Amino acid sequence: MAPSLLASASQILAAPRQGGCGRRRLVITCSAGAGAPPKLVTFLGKGGSGKTTAAAVAAQYYASEGLKTCLVIQSQDPTSEQLMGCKIGNSLTECAANLSTMKLETSKMLLEPLDRLKKVDAQINLTQGVLEAVVGEELGVLPGMDSVCSVLALQKLLNFFSTQRNSSQEEFDVVVYDCNNTEEILRLIGATERARSYLRYVKDLAEKTDIGRLASPSAMRLIYDSARPNGKTSEGRLSSELWNDIEQLIQRISVWFADPSKFACFLIMDPGRSISVSSALRYWGCTTQAGGNICGAFGYTELPSEIHKGVAEKFLPMSFSFLPFLPTDYPADWSRALNSLSQNAKDLLRNTSNKVYASVSFDSVQKSVTLFMPGFDKSEIKLYQYRGGSELLIEAGDQRRVIKLPPAMQGKVGGAKFVDRNLIVTIR
C-alpha cells in the first residue's frame, strides 16, 4: 500500500528557534566524564572546516593515552601526511608509539574480494569460467564502491561483523576514520536499516519467483562463502539458515553503529563562519535521521572570542571546549599540542556514551511522539503513515526514517507541529 502524505511543509507549525567569527582553533562539545573511548571515531562537517585536522588531533591524543590507535584516511589529500609527519600508504604503517596509519584506496582494495569470489566460483562453477577471466587490475572504481570497500576495511580493523575475534587481525583500541566526505558517513550510518528493507524484497524474489528459486541458491552460496560471516561457509546448510544468518548480521551491525560507546560521531565547524555552523547543525539533524548519535561538536578557530558563545547555544544541550589550533603547512608539534589540551576536552574525547540526547520519545498519556530534528526547517519535513498506523515515515533532507509505534499508541495521525527543533506528532 502506498503511503499517504499526512503533513507537508505548510501544515507543520513552527515556533521561533533560538539564534546565535578570524583565524581558527578547535572547539568540542559532548558530555563530560571519564571512561573508555569509543572503538570508531569520525567527524562530520562542511568541507574545509577541519575534519582532517580534528582526526589527527584525536588519533594523537588516544595514542598518547596508551591506547593502540589507527588513523584511517580515505583521500589523496596530503594534509594528514603533513600533520602526522609520516608517509601514509595503503597498508598499516606505524607512525608513532601506539599509532598506526592507513590510506584506503579502492582500486587496490577491489582485488581481495574479487579473488575470494574467484576461489568460490572455481568450486561451484556458477559463472563457468567468466569470473576467472576478469583481470582485477583492469577494473575501475564505480560510484558506490568506495563506501563498500571502506566498510570492509573497517571490518578488518574492528571486526563488527562477528562476535568472534580473529587472532590473525591486528587489534586496535580506537580507529579514527577520516572519510573523504560527510555524506558517505551518513550513508554508512543508515545502511543497515536500508539493507533490511532491500533484504526483505530480495528474499521474496528468491523464494517466490521461478527465476529466484532457480538462480538464488548458487548466487547465495557464491556471495556467502566469499564473505564468510562468522567464519562459516554454506556447506550442508539450508537457504533459510543463510538468510537468517544475514538478517542477524545486519541486526548486529545496526546495534554496533547505534552504540555511542563503540561508534562516535563528532560535528566540526568554523564558529566564525555562519555557513559552517549551519552545515554542522544540518549534519546533526541528518545523523539523527539516519539513526545515529552525535556525541559532540567541534569548532575550529585560532582566536576564540565571546561571540562564539552564541554559536555554543545553538548546539545545546552539548557544551563547548577548545582544542589547539594546528597549522597544516608543516608537521605539527604534537608534544606542545597535546600538553595544551584541557582536561575537559580529554574527558569529552574519552567518554561519548555518558549522555546522548534522545532523538525519539513517546508519551503514552498524551499519545504523542516527539522527534528531535535539529538543523531542519519546517518546510523540509514531511510526515507519512502506512502499514495500518503501526509506523511513521519521516522525510527530511536526503534521509527517510521509519518510526515504529508502541502497540498502545498505534493509530492515525491527528496532527503535527514543529516546536524548538522538535517535531511533535499526535496520534488519534
Image: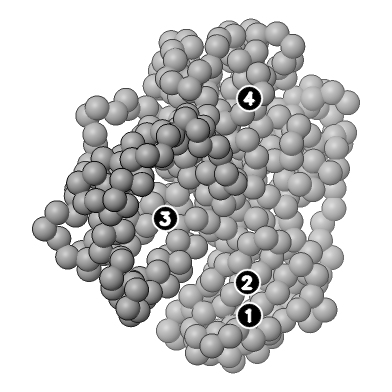
**Mark 4 or mark 2, earlier in chain:** 4
Check disc 3 and give the amino acid type: Ser
For the residues bearing labels 2 and 1, Cβ distance under 8 angstroms:
yes
**Mark 3 or mark 2, earlier in chain:** 3
CA–CA distance in space, label 1 to label 3? 24 Å
Residue at the disc numbered 3:
254
CA–CA distance in space, label 2 to label 1? 6 Å
Name the side, left or right, on which 209 lies relative to 321. Answer: left
Q: Give the numbered dot on residue 76.
A: 4
Nearer the observer, disc 4 or disc 1?
Answer: 4
Check disc 2 and give the amino acid type: Ile
Q: Give the numbered dot on residue 384.
A: 1
Q: Quadrant of residue 311?
A: top right
| Relative depth, front residue between 221 and 274 | 221
On the question of residue 40 being in view, the answer is: no
* Mark 4, secondary structure of its residue: loop
**What residue appears at the point 32 percent right and 25 percent down from the top-left corner?**
170
Nearer the observer, disc 4 or disc 3?
Answer: 4
